[in-house]
Amino acid sequence: MKKHVLAASIVAALATPAMAQQVTVFGVVDMGLMTTSNDVSGVSTKTSNIGAGQSTSRIGFRGEEDLGGGLKALFQIELGLQDLSQQDANVPANNGNAAATATVNANRDSWIGVQSSTLGRFTVGRQYGANFRTWLALDPFGSPNTGSYTDGVRPIATAASDTYTVRLDNIIEWQPVMPKGWFARVQAGQTNADISNLDLKVMGEVVGAGVQYDSGPLRIAGSWLQINSGTEARDAVAAAAGVVGTSAIAAGTKTERQEYMFGLSYDLGAAKLSVIAQDTEITNGVTNAVTSGNKHTQIGVSVPMGALTLGAAMVRGSIEGAAGAKTNDSDGSMIGGTYALSKRTNFYGYVGTGERKTVAGVRTQYEALSLGLRHQF
């Protein structure tokens, strides 16, 4: 009898930590046919490939542990999966362009943190930016890969001044406990690197915030993000030899990026309407002169029809250059939909078109199409 009691006690002691901690494996497998075409002043380029058309394939691990006293430890590790159709390096990718192999990149949300029943949630790591959270909360498509990256629904301004920042590294985020219907987040981060042989300090500072309010069919969301980056010269330096105190170098650089986003959606039952306004401005932090920026407004609608959900969106905006002068007009549209085979699996199809026109009248036209299958686990 004593042996049975002892054995039961040992089993219970070993099982307690496992019950206190919960770990979930999650992910997405997305594969579809994607085609894009660009036309610049009559010169066309068309690309077709097999890839993720609705959302990037990924695998992740998410867990929490009850620490007692209203505290929980939290973590998430999320890995992006690319080129899932190219398992053999000898097989050409993208219809004969460059060869590719399947890769795993730790480039998605990965963080660790704690959650308090009174103070809220604190997380540290690589996380979504506040503006991208606002976009996800309002966009009728949830920012799919098709069209949204080819001037369809999420217009590309330039490589240096895209519409909003998706993810941020080295970020501390606080989600405070809020009244019913309210949700908020505050983000801050800093990355400094000292280059000793040049006596330079490389700076990276981030601060942002977002708020969302849900009341019945109405949702209102807004956010702001500021990113400062550059270098600061702290001493006179020999540019070639790296010897301190022998010659002068440039005083350093600083770039300030301001992003704003605001929008709302209203669910009529038969359809959900949404509008999103976005403004990004990039300035020289030394001279305070505007170097680039963009402004866009999107209206969208999603219509649930049983297993089928249809959506459409239109966007108009402008792209700015030095001193805030307009350099391009940008507009686009996208239609598409998903058909649910189950709670986790769906077919999808999207068609996106867009156009960018310079002040000189040069037009760049874009088209994108994707048809595929997506499974979540």
Image (spheres, rainbow, N blue to C red):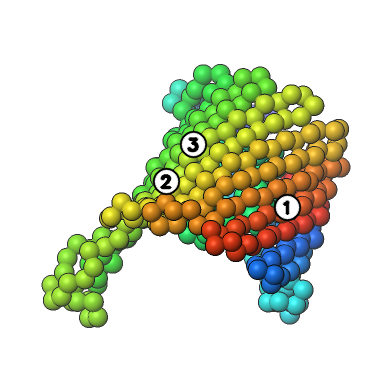
Label 1 is placed on what type of residue? Gly
Label 3–label 2 contact, CB within 8 A: no
Q: Label 3 is placed on what type of residue?
A: Ser
Q: Which residue is mark 3?
A: 223
Count of marks placed on residues: 3
Residue 256 pos. (x, y %): 37, 51
**Label 1 or label 2, whichever comes before in sequence order:** 2
Callout 1: SS? strand
Q: Which residue is mark 1?
A: 352
Position of residue 270 measured from the top left corner of the image (x, y, whole percent): 80, 26
**Residue at the disc numbered 2:** 258
Q: Position of residue 244 (x, y in %)?
A: 16, 72
Of 345 and 307, nearer the camera is 307
Residue drawn where x is 60% and y is 52% of the image: 330
Q: Earlier in the sequence, mark 1 or mark 3?
A: 3
Q: CA distance from mark 1 to mark 3?
A: 26 Å
Foreground: disc 1 or disc 3: 1
Does the image show residue 203?
Answer: no
Counting from the top left corner in percent of width and height, residue 327 is at 50, 57
Please tell me how crowded label 2 is: few (under 14), some (14-19), or many (20+) other residues with Cα within 10 Å. some
Residue 308 sits above or below residue 231 on the image: above
Look at 65% across and 56% down and name the residue there: 355
Give the vertical position of 48 relative to 77 (above or below): below
Front position in the image: 314 or 5: 314
Q: Residue at x 57, y 53 (%)?
A: 329
Mark closer to the chain start, 3 or 2: 3
Q: Say which residue appears at 60% left-offset and 58% top-offset.
A: 357
Image-quadrant location for residue 40: bottom right
